[in-house]
Image: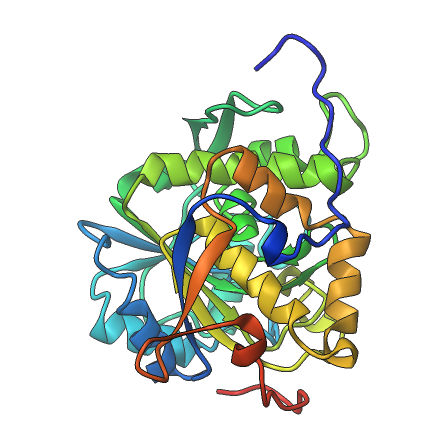
Amino acid sequence: MSDQKPVPGKGGDQYIPYAQRTGKEAVVYFTRDLSAEGLRRIFARVKENMTGKVGIKLHTGEPHGPNIIPRQWVKELIKNDLQGAAVLETNTYYEGGRYTTEQHRKTLETNGWTFCPVDIMDAEGTTTLPVNGGKWFTEMYMGKNIRDYDSLFVLTHFKGHTMGGFGGSDKNIGIGCADGRIGKGMIHSKPGSDDMWDVSGEEFMERMTESAKAVTDYFGEHISFVNVLRNMSVSCDCEGIGAEPVVTPNIGIVASVDILAVDQASVDLVYALEEKDRKALVERMESRHGLRQLSYMKELCMGNDRYRLIDIDHDDQEILPREAVKGVVPFTGSTV
């Protein structure tokens, strides 16, 4: 990091069309099958590097949260494909149902996460991971137990986010692995500030992404990403029953070993929807300058924003996002 005061980048409210992107292409897998079996099928495409002790980074939700990834899907995945894996969480920065470890355990029971181990990684302290090439941080404080795992499967409910514009894999590990007091505080608040939420816009996206980079660098090749594009409220799952009603159609599931590609493809799929269907979620992304997550991941060499979208429902044909969302139906309720 330079001794000069960092300056946030710009353009977080600007969507970059595929034709304007440069660099190599990653591979992103896609299925329309929003079910336990669909999740298992797409996980099979990115499971090769899941070796040793595996943690599943998952947002388990505030009490009775309506939009989280269905528990049964995760139960089937662990039972059949990830035996012995633990779900990984950290306590929250804000007061609520997951603020303390005791409250968090009670919420996990309320929400039904009782069929596998759930490791609240910061329950017994923190550790630091280096941030290589960052401009805001040289290290990030994480839940101590992150070091207990050899591989990380990042299973993300893709949706909007009040501060981040959208919550994808970047947010799931950038915020979700940082410990509830120090790490999350570093991301959300400027040093010495009395306002715990005084970081926003491009600076917030960059701080969150540097935290995510610390996690991806730590696991190296032993990290995979799945985004579930279902029940996509403009609100994060941290808002629980207070989340805004879902109006965006369900799309499907995407997977990659490239964090930028999986989040970029998720955003592209939303933008590929008809204007009336994408309006709410796109407005949330752009108004919060959330697209800076993508451009900053590229600047930090975390992955590729160009990719081949492989349709595993149709013999691995390469398709475009507009083909993937063709025929989506208006949102009518959750799929279990």
Residue at x 61%, y 59% (from the top left corner): 97
* Colouring method of the image: rainbow
Classify residue 191 as left or right of residue 322: right
Q: Where on the picture, by quarter, is residue 125?
A: top left
Q: Where on the picture, by quarter, is residue 281?
A: bottom right
194 w.r.t. 108: above or below: above
Judge by depth and name the residue closer to the eye, 116 or 139: 139
47 w.r.t. 135: above or below: below
Judge by depth and name the residue closer to the eye, 117 or 223: 223
- Disc count in the image? 0
Extreme residue toward the top, this view: 3
Residue at x 22%, y 75% (from the top left corner): 80
Extreme residue toward the left, this view: 52
Q: Position of residue 164 (x, y in %)?
A: 69, 50
Q: Position of residue 208 (x, y in %)?
A: 60, 40
Judge by depth and name the residue closer to the eye, 151 or 217: 217
Q: Position of residue 124 (x, y in %)?
A: 41, 38
Please say whether residue 235 is visible from this viewpoint.
yes
Extreme residue toward the front, this view: 19
Quarter in which the N terminus is drawn: top right
Residue at x 29%, y 61% (from the top left corner): 46
Q: Position of residue 198 (x, y in %)?
A: 79, 36
Residue at x 58%, y 85% (from the top left corner): 326
Please say whether residue 68 is visible from this viewpoint.
no
